[in-house]
Amino acid sequence: MIKKIRIVGEVAVVTATADFHPLRQLKQLAKELGSLGFEGVVLFDLLAVNGTTPLYIAAQNNHVDIVHTLLKKGAKVDQQDKNNATALTISALIGNAEMVKVLIKHGAKVDHKASNGFTPLILAAQNGHTNVIEVLLESGAKIDLQNDDGVTALMWAGLHDHADTVKTLLQKGANTSLKSKKGKTAAEIAKDPAIVELLKSGAK
């Protein structure tokens, strides 16, 4: 519930209770901001209690039409939540290739690092979303970026037994000789014998 709205220059400062849900209460926000004589796009960048924005929530729930509307109205495509995650981060994580395309088209940073250095590509690989990986790579994502533990997309795909994802990454030129901070390569991290062999073959 919205408790108080205060206008500071071009910024609307909203005080809300813990049950505040920005996506469901956009109309209420718009009405109350309008009564205060406030006009602008800042409405769409207000942070919820948990640090997310309406854009993030719309992406998380696969509402492509709402995402289009929010971006058209000026929402910041790379606004981060408390974990440094963006709308593209969550879209890659859940495997929504269409949403990924929309966000990238509007300027989302393809190699943005969320908490612990996880990029959209790494998250997609970790969950076996090969279609998302292809979109990200076609959009210029760096295939061998490592997270804070030195683990790459290829290493994550191998660890979680995503054979098709491993094959795609190898075909796209992923480096099999890179090592994590623990000194292990993708082949040494993988558990499935078939994937281990695939990674060793790809290293040749």
Image: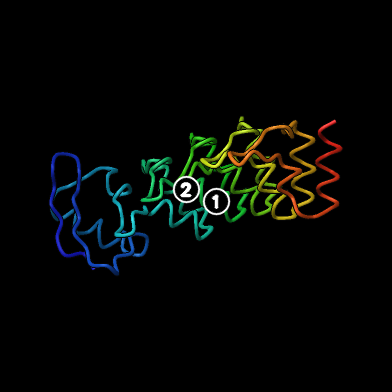
Scheme of colours in the image: rainbow
How many numbered markers are drawn? 2
Secondary element type, mark 2? helix
The correct choice, above or below, for 181 with respect to 27 in the image is above
Give the image location of residue 8, x and y in percent.
13, 43
Q: Work out which quarter of the rendered image holds the C terminus and state it.
A: top right
Q: Work out which quarter of the rendered image holds the N terminus and state it.
A: bottom left
Q: Nearer the viewer, residue 182 or 108?
A: 182
Point 44% across, 47% down: residue: 85
Residue named by callout 1? 91
The correct choice, above or below, for 118 with respect to 22 in the image is above
Q: Residues within 10 Å of mark 2 (few under 14, many from 20)?
A: many
C-alpha gap between disc 1 and disc 2: 6 Å
Secondary element type, mark 1? helix
Q: Residues within 10 Å of mark 1 (few under 14, many from 20)?
A: many
Residue named by callout 2? 87
Q: Amino acid at mark 1?
A: Ser
Q: Amino acid at mark 2?
A: Ala
Give the image location of residue 13, x and y in percent.
18, 50
- The image quadrant of residue 177 is top right
Determine which of the numbered discs, if any, sits on residue 164 in the image. Answer: none
Residue sitting at the far front? 183
Give the image location of residue 32, x and y in percent.
19, 58
Point 37% across, 54% down: residue: 52
Left or right relative to 130: residue 97: left
Circles 1 and 2 in contact, beta carbons < 8 Å: yes
Point 74% across, 44% down: residue: 188
Give the image location of residue 179, x and y in percent.
66, 36
Q: Nearer the viewer, residue 24 or 118?
A: 118
